[in-house]
Image (tube, rainbow, N blue to C red):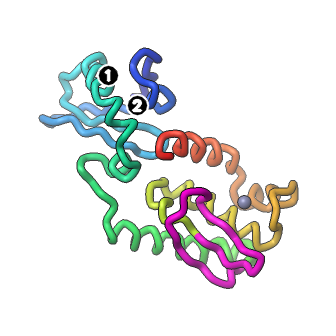
Amino acid sequence: MFCKVSRKNSRVYEKMKVKIIRKNIKHMYIENKGDYIEVRCNKYLSDEEIYKFLDKIKDKFQKIEKKELVFGKEGKITQKDYEKLKEIINFLINKYSKKMNLYPSKISFREKNTSWGSCTYKNHIIFNLKLVSLPVELIEYVVVHELAHIKEKNHSKKFWKIVEKYLPDYKDKIKKIRKIEKVIR
Ligand SMILES: [Zn+2]
């Protein structure tokens, strides 16, 4: 069930959809799933009570580090999460390099504050470790975007044609990324 959060509740989650899953559980768990907030709670809790609670912690939501948001609970990003991210990216690079016939000279990972990824003139692709917070479908977009830069170094029409060929719904993915950036940056 998707519920729209009314404006009066919060500045932060007004742009995020809230998905409520009622279960036979005692506690409430709030987790940022990237493009929506998932609330798992006791089946007898009303929407109103949930939003009241979200409202109470909205300041915490604003201050919270994205990693805590993404993994919910007290979760911190662990070395294991980064290993998993690298595995996913290597898998996607292999998959799309073959499809697109575009191969990076080198791949590396850095913690950056700006872009999700970049591609140098020597076709060295650098991925932002913060990608660990994105859902796989959006990591996939970043991979295809950077691979396309091997052929087109700018964001010309030609460039977007390449991206579109391999990810026809790329515009949708860009929208999702922008939404997430608003919350975690
Ligand atoms: Zn670009």
What range of the chain is rendered magenta?
Answer: 103-126
Count residues near mark 1 (Cα–Cα under 10 Å), then give few for <14, some for 14-19, many for 20+.
Answer: some
Q: Nearer the viewer, residue 41 or 179?
A: 179
Q: Is mark 1 within 8 Å of ligand 1?
A: no
Q: Residue at horizontal 50%, vertical 46%?
A: 185
Q: Nearer the viewer, residue 76 or 140?
A: 76
Q: Is mark 2 within 8 Å of ligand 1?
A: no
Q: Is residue 109 left or right of residue 174?
A: left
Please state the quadrant of the image where ligand 1 appears.
bottom right
The location of residue 75, given as percent across then percent down, is 27, 54
Tag 2 secondary structure: strand
Q: Is residue 47 left or right of residue 13?
A: left
Q: Mark 1 highlights which residue?
A: 51
Mark sitting on residue 123 = none
**Residue projecting furthest to the bottom:** 105
Q: Residue at horizontal 63%, vertical 83%?
A: 106
Task: Find out whether the residues at labels 1 and 2 contact each other: C-beta distance under 8 Å.
Answer: yes
Q: Nearer the viewer, mark 1 or mark 2?
A: 1
Q: Mark 2 highlights which residue?
A: 18
Q: Residue at horizontal 77%, vertical 76%?
A: 121
Tag 1 secondary structure: helix
Q: Nearer the viewer, residue 108 or 144?
A: 108
Q: Is residue 116 magenta?
A: yes
Q: Is residue 170 left or right of residue 82?
A: right
Q: Residue at horizontal 68%, vertical 66%?
A: 146
The location of residue 111, given as percent across then percent down, is 50, 66
Q: Is residue 51 magenta?
A: no
**Along the polypeptide, which appears first: circle 1 or circle 2?**
2
Instruction: Establish if 185 lies above or below 91.
Output: above
The location of residue 148, given as percent across then percent down, is 75, 67
The amino acid beneath tag 1 is: Tyr
Instruction: Establish if 131 lies above or below 1.
Output: below
